Image (spheres, rainbow, N blue to C red):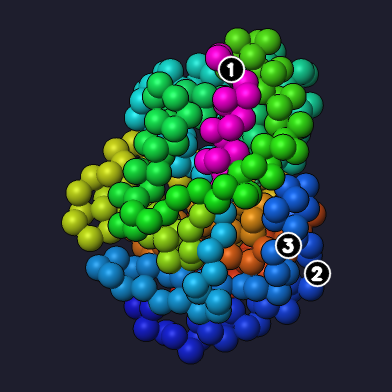
Amino acid sequence: MNICGDYEALNLMVEEALQYTKHGKVANYIPALSTANRDLLSLSIYEGESTVASAGDTFKTFTLQSISKVLALALALMDKGEDGVFSRVGMEPTGDPFNSIIKLETHSPSKPLNPMINAGALAVTNMIEGNSVDEKLGRLLSFIHELTGNSSITFNEQVAISEYNTADLNRSLAYFLKQHDVVTGNIERLLELYTKQCAIEVNCEDLAKIAYVIGNEGRHVETGRSIIPLHIARIMKTFMTTCGMYNASGEFAIKVGIPSKSGVSGAIMASVPHGPGIGIYGPSLDEKGNSIAGMKLLESLSHRYDLNIF
Ligand code: DON
């Protein structure tokens, strides 16, 4: 498939999807995200062997937010194995918003239902090995450098601090989980690591490359060397399909049908199995916290290039 060569159509699809930005809002519960420009929309598609196409404001960088949960999960699975990770976090979609607390109390045991909701992600981040926040974050960043081939990627300090200072809901989730022995250790250090992880800053091309590796059996974009074991790449794609767009995952699977993960920055990472990796940034969000124009754009891409995996 040569989607990258279809440059005019890609530009046109971005332009068409742009009109939807006015129906959404940028996230403001993390103050540093509230200054984003609602009318941006950018796209990169990576098809391997350095073939990349971009449209829109492609140099714009943004934070991964919840997309980092997929990468933290991969690292935790490499560190602790499936039994270790899934003894503390489940595999089921919730049908609730990403920051919901309700099922932690109504479900027994109080294990978060999946690693994509905030409670589950906090439990996963808590399992990343390392002796300090810096060491753990450093391991996650090195992993992302390897996935993208871009070793200049780091986290945005201002966004991390802004979230850390206002993360009272995540703080309560984490303390609740500690009370129930799902997470261990110092909760403030966990919040520090989690908010820094969410504030890792990339551009659309980086995101498309990460998506490509996940979609293509965990192999390095150029050398083909295995970066993520195949069974872990499968788990990542599966969670992206069942829980990646939160309580919109079902509708998204029907309309788009590509394993994808969103973040409240407005980013979406979409991995077509054995196909292209797609990175999108459009900070105008719908009420479920997903990029409103980004989802429309993925719908068009899926139809035009027959990318629906179902
Ligand atoms: O924990 C939070 O609320 C954010 N750092 C990440 C949430 C998020 O990206 C949800 N995605 N749509």
Using the numbered discs, state the Cα–Cα distance from disc 1 to disc 2 in whole angstroms.
41 Å
- Please state which of the two labelled residues, at mark 1 or mark 2, is closer to the viewer: 1
> Does residue 166 lie above or below 104 as drawn?
below
Instruction: Give the residues drawn in magenta, as a range.
Output: 184-199
Give the mark nearest the N terminus, 1 or 2: 2
> Do labels 3 and 2 touch, CB within 8 Å?
no
Q: Name the residue at 54% across, 19% down.
A: 88
Q: Quadrant of the N terminus?
A: bottom left
Label count reads 3
Mark 3 nearby-residue class (10 Å; few <14, some 14–19, many ≥20): few
- Please state which of the two labelled residues, at mark 3 or mark 2, is closer to the viewer: 3
Q: Name the residue at 34% across, 78% down.
A: 2
Answer with the quarter of the image where residue 233 lies: top left
Q: With 267 as the anchor, is 204 left or right in this view?
A: left
Q: Which residue is mark 3?
A: 35
Residue 62 screen position, x and y as percent: 57, 59
